[in-house]
Amino acid sequence: MTERAGEVCPRVVRARSRDRPCPPRGCGRTVTAVEALEDYAGCGQGESGRVTDGTGTGRICAPPHHDPVVVPHHRYTVPMTSTIDDETLARRLAQGTGEILKGVRNVGLLRDGELGDAGDSIAQEWIARALTIHRPDDSVLSEEAADDLVRLKRERVWIIDPLDGTREYAGVRQDWAVHIALAVNGSVTTAAVGMPDLGQVFTTGESRAVMGHPTNRLVISRNSTPQVAVHVAEQTGMELVTMGSCGAKAISVLLGDNDAYVHAGGQYEWDNAAPVGVCAAAGLHCSRLDGSPLVYNNEDTYLPDVLICRPELADEILAQAAAFFGEHGSYMPEA
């Protein structure tokens, strides 16, 4: 069934609660963003919480002059049960967040920076609520939330970037991602990288790197060019290509579209925890540019450089990066 702007919900089925009973059919009542998030997070086996037309696609109840907010009914639901395992939780959080972000964008009411800000905040709220319900004893480190340093005393910390590649998301590009990672004692044990516009989620338990014929391509940020990456490309004969989002670049290596991803000049733990977790589990090399391991849940969350590549290329790339650093004293020397 095609969604049409301004169409009133033909049938309304909402999750009942003590403070918000089911509205009547076709009520036309505006549902707040918070209510929409609560219903979405509460949608699971045995309860609905979605506006549904029987096709598996839900729409939040809206008056005729508003565009409906499209939210999936069955495929991207997070059952409200504490027995859900970490892998499933990470995957469904990435799926659900991606659908929420696409819904916010597709309504067409916001553009550019306003769209990016709204997507970030709404996605963050939904993830935070879901984790509070499912993992109340775990800590959370997120780009979009205040840093609670109690996490330093916790073994389990979820490291989240609800929207990686805000510019790309607002610019209606495909190279943006959702990052969900669980670090246990500093190492990522479970992770999911959602690529919503591709309709895919890559996880630590299910993803395997494509190790076909090398492409001889090295992917870097489309917003800045690490000088060390230019040096590596020149010395190895690799072609430089650009993309947005750390997650998108990492997944391009996992899928065999590029052979390596080099970044220098600044990232934070939430930028690369999920991509590193997924790619390492898939069989790729993941490290800092000096070859040291990536350690998470630090007091200082700044993690300025990363290498993700086919395993057989790691030694040569690391050697070239070391030579560049030895000559310039930095991976990003000032001009």
Image (spheres, rainbow, N blue to C red):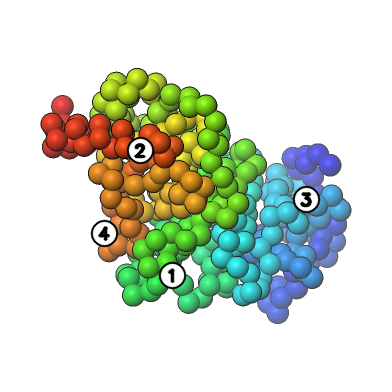
Closest to the observer: 181 or 217? Answer: 217
Tell me where residue 49 sits by quadrant.
Answer: bottom right
117 up-or-down from 130: above or below: above
Q: Are marks 3 and 1 in contact (CB under 8 Å)?
A: no
- Amino acid type for the residue under numbered disc 2: Ala
Q: CA distance from mark 2 to mark 1?
A: 30 Å
Q: Is residue 253 left or right of residue 107?
A: left
Instruction: State the image coordinates of residue 279 (x, y, percent, origin top left).
Output: 48, 46
Tell me where residue 265 sits by quadrant.
Answer: top left
The residue identified by callout 4 is 300
Q: Secondary structure at mark 4?
A: loop
Q: Secondary structure at mark 2?
A: helix
Q: Residue furthest bottom?
A: 18
Q: Earlier in the sequence, mark 4 or mark 2?
A: 4
Q: CA distance from mark 3 to mark 1?
A: 34 Å
Q: Is residue 77 left or right of residue 296?
A: right
> Residue 113: in sight, yes or no?
no
The residue identified by callout 2 is 314
Q: Secondary structure at mark 1?
A: strand
The residue identified by callout 3 is 57
User: For residue 156, which numbered disc appears in the image?
Assistant: 1
From the image, which quarter does the C terminus lie in? top left
Q: Earlier in the sequence, mark 2 or mark 3?
A: 3
- Amino acid type for the residue under numbered disc 1: Arg
